[in-house]
Image (spheres, rainbow, N blue to C red):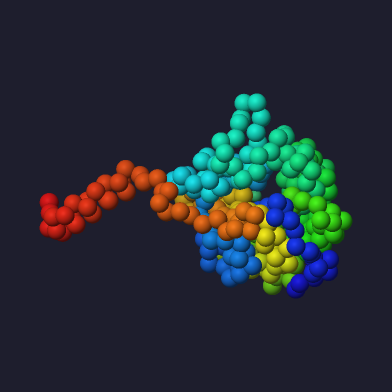
Amino acid sequence: MNSLTNSKNIEKRSRESVLFITLDSCRYDTLASSCVPNIRSVGPLHKADAPSYFTYGSHVAMFAGFTPGLARLAQPILNPKFGKLFKLVGAGFPGKGTESYELDGRTIVNGFSRLGFKTIGSGAVGWFNPHVPTGRHLSEHFERYFYPGNSYSLDRQLDFIATELKAAGSSDVFVFLNVGETHVPYYFNGAAWDPDDNPCVPFQKTNRSAECRDRQKLCCEFADGMLRNLLAAFSESTILICGDHGDCWGEDGLWEHGVSHRCTLTVPLLVRVRGEPVCADQSKAIFTTKKRFSRFVTRIKDRYGSEAR
Ligand SMILES: [Zn+2]
């Protein structure tokens, strides 16, 4: 299965270097139930809100620094509203001092390039096709870029990245990888099913949610094995892994993404910054009115006993 030729020997990258991976369409519950030890080694798995419900919108937002976040946590990085991992600063947008990387440019890719980082990118799904205007927009700021032409060529994407990392020597790098295997039709090279058999078609009447769940999970586990060496090379650097959006699997009669729904807007998120995993600090949680009331009732019960009315 593992056809990594170049990536077997990826050298450790600098502390400032960044690896940004989007598992396209990956649902939070899929990753949570998958056996993905390499991805899990990055840090704790967080349940986050995506910045959009389709690939282009979400990546344009993320390339402007609006990465998925936990809105009810007053903590930098995990909540980009509180402090961004990648902050585009400029005349009207000063940093707040809570950002991990302050960047000046049209996108974070452009910003890293202007800082002197080597920028290397590979996007698998159609929105990343550099021969169409939208794909050109997502890919134009990378110094080195590879579009494989289908959504199940992670081996070729990783070989490209490994080759480019070798050429970059000891430079700081910003590497972006969009994994397509987790996107419909949920297929990877060597899978036991036909790539033309898509179990998640918009407006379908047949309930194939079980196959969607099983296949996306197996795609995650396949990607995890393939990503082992790349993740190890960045273990002392910064890594962000997230879904760009999720998919609906029949919830409220909906299928796939491109629609605003809790299933398309809930994504997995794992982060480490300069070698340190980013954990949620529950003391920074913002409580809702309902939770505040619940805590008030608990205090009353503690004081007066559970029979208090
Ligand atoms: Zn997507």
> Which quadrant holds the N terminus?
bottom right
Observer-nearest of 94 and 216: 94
Observer-nearest of 54 and 35: 35
Observer-nearest of 176 and 98: 98
Residue beneath the point at 87% across and 56% down: 167
Residue 215 pos. (x, y %): 62, 66
Q: Residue furthest right?
A: 167
Residue 237 pos. (x, y %): 68, 56
Left or right side of 32 for 63: right
Residue beneath the point at 81% across and 61% down: 162
When the figure is inspected, residue 11 is found, relative to residue 139, above or below; the finding is below
Q: How many marks?
A: 0
Left or right side of 166 for 66: left
Q: Is residue 27 visible?
A: no
Residue beneath the point at 65% across and 43% down: 101
Observer-nearest of 217 and 235: 235
Residue beneath the point at 74% across and 43% down: 112
Q: Is residue 99 visible?
A: yes
Q: Residue 37 falls in which quadrant of the image?
A: bottom right
Residue 10 pos. (x, y %): 79, 64
Residue 239 pos. (x, y %): 65, 55
